[in-house]
């Protein structure tokens, strides 16, 4: 130890207030360098890969479906939350565990300010890792040519959730400086996520929509595949959730500033005000979520937050092909399926080609969603002058991987589905099964398009299940008066069928014909 | 006077840790001697503004630590080495010292030089980049001293600073203490009377929460002469004699 330093340090001048932010930045840099969060990131990365990314690749390559699992049901948050909370608790309890509380207290910087630097470093690591992991996942999706736009608002929700977990964990550690704080916090966070998921599965409306693991409305199964394709992702519910999660984070961090040892009266008063502000923010978020309703075009709308600009459709240049000489145009997000769609439509379009009610073109439209009345949405409709076939492919399982089906969707399965829906639309069947004569014409058209009568009951049971159809419901045989009439009609020469359809199509669609009138 | 303490008490539950201490001291090295449980650490923690006194009056560096603003000013000018020094195992020596320099709100531009100087002064320059978890107990103690002196404190409180130091380091440390005492008030709490004898210009002996002696090392030595008190060195005999006298007076009362 040297008694006299070679360069004697001059007596310190009075502190300039401008040094405080620079000082805080340097403090943050030290904390970032020595934070425990990077040690846990490899584990989170592995979990993220196996729990968030891999299962999503089983879904169709559309952002709405790929992110249903990891963003909608909040698996990215589940993968991060408990670990982030645990590490934050570890960091929050550091001074107490290490016996440094006295030394830190005896310094000029308020204890709360020092704690904030420690927490901020923890949160920065956690959020940066979350954004990097999600960014890599989206980059891989982009490499796989996944269609649509990424749900950035939901990424913001995930980031806020990570911040909230870090703040809550840090507060636990600060108040309970024990080595057990971290594991207990991890368990508590995991339990909270499990309960949140359970409530999320149950509740499709009300306050539970605020839970970051509740996919209802925001990501509603196949009803939301058009999110980011025809319309922007609706930011209303994400904003409410961000308010809620930010509120939790503010409350948790502010609570560590309330004890007398945290700092001066002014600082503690500020902490109290922040606590109240956080509570207000979280409460407002819950209230806003409870006012959310499902919009007709999909996505949860919160009237108090809704911006009409988000209802404007996304401009796009369609990708087009031809089926039986008729142009078929799809949204570019569905471009990969254009050959499947044209191949599926070609036989049925050929069956009706030249008829007055036959479509002159087919075009994909955004799916219309049920809003409580009016029965199930129609995936294929026919209307307008001249007639246009409108395809809401967002309501269908497209060929290939299907994360929420029994297995991948076969091209033939998809083709059968499209043909049935087209024949139904052409015969004017509508929501239900249709009148007997409509069913007979539909069956004859399908037979002509390559779907034998014997296979049709099963196809109908899958595509248009009745209200009492359960998993054990068995389709009946292709017998009875409907199929008898259909067989009779199908054996007519094509010209005769066309002539009858040209003469009776309007009456057929209006449901004014009986089976006996079918030749 | 940099330290003005009058009739200060502090109680922890049923234990009266400090029972009416009055003390004044200015620049120089002041030794605080006493047996285990005498109240030295509690008195030092009060001077370090970690805990408030139960009663009595404390003024440090001409300010009242009971008020937040003055307390912060005191803390900016304070160096403190607790008895049980904790540390962050993942920090390097330089980071540890820098961390506390920043917590002491030193001007950021001065921090790197001050950190380097403090580390050099405790002879840890060669281990500045070593993680604290790799250091021996004595080296950790020196890192603790470095963080205490990094801000060139006007009031330096050292609780058992030489615990764990080898004889060579203790000698060097005493030299450092004398040097620091020329510009600041240094209060050293210790069991080791030879440290006090070598480095302190004034000392106080505490027992049962009270100061039973205050004076120079020579005066303490004089108290032991001819008493037959236990001790290998004159100062130790003075220490033992004063303690014995204080205890018998308490017993008689």
Image (cartoon, rainbow, N blue to C red):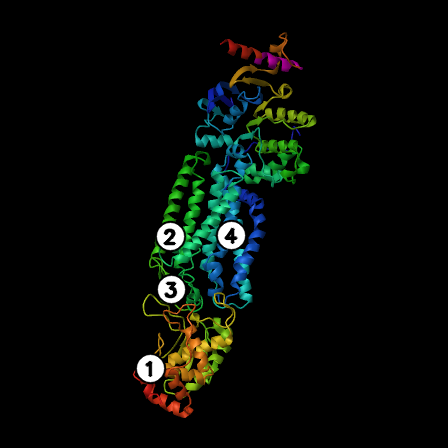
Q: Could you say which quadrant of the image residue B213 lies in? A: top right
Q: Main secondary structure of the magenta part?
A: helix
The residue carrying mark 4 is: A80
Instruction: Kindly check if marks 3 and 1 are in contact, taking CB atoms under 8 A apart as contact.
Output: no
The residue carrying mark 3 is: A309
User: Are tags 3 and 2 found on a single chain?
Assistant: yes
Q: Secondary structure at mark 4?
A: helix
Q: Position of residue A306 (x, y in %)?
A: 36, 60
Height in image: B242 above or below A468? above
Residue density around tag 1, few if under 14, some if 14–19, many if 20 or more, within 10 Å: many
Q: Is residue B234 magenta?
A: yes
Per the rendering, the mark at residue A285 is: 2
User: Are tags 4 and 2 found on a single chain?
Assistant: yes
Instruction: Kindly check if marks 3 and 2 are in contact, taking CB atoms under 8 A apart as contact.
Output: no
Q: CA distance from mark 1 to mark 4?
A: 55 Å
- The earlier-in-sequence mark between 3 and 2 is 2
The residue that appears at 64% across and 40% down in the rendered structure is B131
- The earlier-in-sequence mark between 4 and 2 is 4
Q: Nearer the viewer, residue B60 or A135?
A: A135
Q: CA distance from mark 2 to mark 1?
A: 49 Å
Q: Position of residue A315 (x, y in %)?
A: 43, 71
Q: Position of residue B17 (x, y in %)?
A: 50, 22
The answer to whether residue A333 is visible is: yes
């Amino acid at each position: 130890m040297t008694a006299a330093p070679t360069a004697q340090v001059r007596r310190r001048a009075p502190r300039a207030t401008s040094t405080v932010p620079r000082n805080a930045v340097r403090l943050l840099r030290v904390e970032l360098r020595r934070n425990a969060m990077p040690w846990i990131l490899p584990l989170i990365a592995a979990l993220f890969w196996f729990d968030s990314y891999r299962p999503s690749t089983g879904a169709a390559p559309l952002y709405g479906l790929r992110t249903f699992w990891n963003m909608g049901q909040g698996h990215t948050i589940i993968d991060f939350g408990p670990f982030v909370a645990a590490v934050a608790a570890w960091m929050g309890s550091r001074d107490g565990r290490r016996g440094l509380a006295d030394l830190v207290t005896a310094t000029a910087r308020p204890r709360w300010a020092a704690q904030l630097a420690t927490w901020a470093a923890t949160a920065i690591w956690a959020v940066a890792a979350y954004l990097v992991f999600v960014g890599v996942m989206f980059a891989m999706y982009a490499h796989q040519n996944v269609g649509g736009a990424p749900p950035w608002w939901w990424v913001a929700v995930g980031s806020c959730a990570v911040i909230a977990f870090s703040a809550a964990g840090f507060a636990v550690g600060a108040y309970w400086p024990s080595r057990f704080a971290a594991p207990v916090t991890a368990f508590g966070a995991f339990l909270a996520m499990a309960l949140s998921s359970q409530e999320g599965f149950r509740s499709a409306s009300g306050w539970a929509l605020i839970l970051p693991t509740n996919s209802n409305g925001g990501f509603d199964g196949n009803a939301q595949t058009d999110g980011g394709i025809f319309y922007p992702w609706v930011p209303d519910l994400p904003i409410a959730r961000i308010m809620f999660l930010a509120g939790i984070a503010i409350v948790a961090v502010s609570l560590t500033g309330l004890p007398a040892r945290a700092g001066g009266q002014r600082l503690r008063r500020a902490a109290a005000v922040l606590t109240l502000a956080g509570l207000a923010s979280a409460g407002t978020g819950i209230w806003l979520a409870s006012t959310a309703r499902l919009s007709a075009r999909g996505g949860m709308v919160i009237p108090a937050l809704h911006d009409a600009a988000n209802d404007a459709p996304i401009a796009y240049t369609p990708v087009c092909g031809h089926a039986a000489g008729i142009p078929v145009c799809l949204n570019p997000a569905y471009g990969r399926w254009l050959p499947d769609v044209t191949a599926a439509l070609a036989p049925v379009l050929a069956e009706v080609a030249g008829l007055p009610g036959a479509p002159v073109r087919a075009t994909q439209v955004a799916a219309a969603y049920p809003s409580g009345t009016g029965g199930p949405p129609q995936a294929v409709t026919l209307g307008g002058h001249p007639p246009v076939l409108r395809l809401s492919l967002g309501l269908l399982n497209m060929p290939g991987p299907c994360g929420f089906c029994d297995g991948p969707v076969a091209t033939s399965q998809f083709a059968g589905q499209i043909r049935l829906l087209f024949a139904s639309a052409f015969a004017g069947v509508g929501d239900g099964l249709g009148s007997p004569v409509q069913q007979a014409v539909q069956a004859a058209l399908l037979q002509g398009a390559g779907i034998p009568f014997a296979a049709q009951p099963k196809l109908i049971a899958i595509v248009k299940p009745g209200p009492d159809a359960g998993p054990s419901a068995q389709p009946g045989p292709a017998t009875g008066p409907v199929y008898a009439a259909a067989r009779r009609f199908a054996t007519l020469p094509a010209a005769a069928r066309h002539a009858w359809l040209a003469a009776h199509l309007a009456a057929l669609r209006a449901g004014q014909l009986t089976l006996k009138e079918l030749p | 006077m940099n330290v003005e303490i009058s009739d200060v008490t502090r109680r922890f539950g049923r234990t009266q840790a400090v029972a009416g201490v009055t003390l004044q001291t200015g620049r120089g090295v002041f030794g605080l001697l006493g047996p285990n449980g005498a109240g030295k650490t509690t008195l030092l923690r009060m001077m370090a503004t970690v805990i408030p006194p139960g009663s009595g009056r404390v003024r440090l560096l001409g300010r009242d630590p009971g008020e937040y603003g003055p307390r912060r000013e005191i803390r900016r000018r304070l160096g403190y080495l607790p008895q049980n020094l904790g540390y962050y195992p993942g920090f390097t020596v330089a980071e540890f010292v820098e961390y506390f320099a920043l917590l002491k709100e030193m001007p950021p531009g001065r921090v790197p030089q001050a950190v380097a100087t403090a580390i050099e002064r405790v002879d840890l320059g060669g281990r500045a980049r070593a993680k604290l978890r790799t250091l021996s107990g004595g080296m950790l103690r020196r890192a603790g001293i470095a963080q205490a002196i990094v801000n060139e404190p006007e009031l330096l409180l050292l609780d058992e600073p030489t615990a764990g130091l080898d004889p060579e380091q203790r000698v060097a440390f005493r030299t450092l203490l004398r040097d620091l005492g020329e510009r600041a008030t240094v209060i050293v709490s210790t069991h080791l009377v030879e440290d006090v004898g070598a480095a302190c210009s004034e000392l106080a002996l505490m027992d049962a929460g009270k100061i039973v002696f205050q004076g120079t090392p020579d005066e303490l030595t004089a108290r032991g002469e001819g008493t037959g008190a236990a001790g290998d060195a004159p100062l130790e005999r003075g220490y033992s004699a004063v303690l014995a006298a204080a205890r018998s007076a308490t017993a008689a009362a």
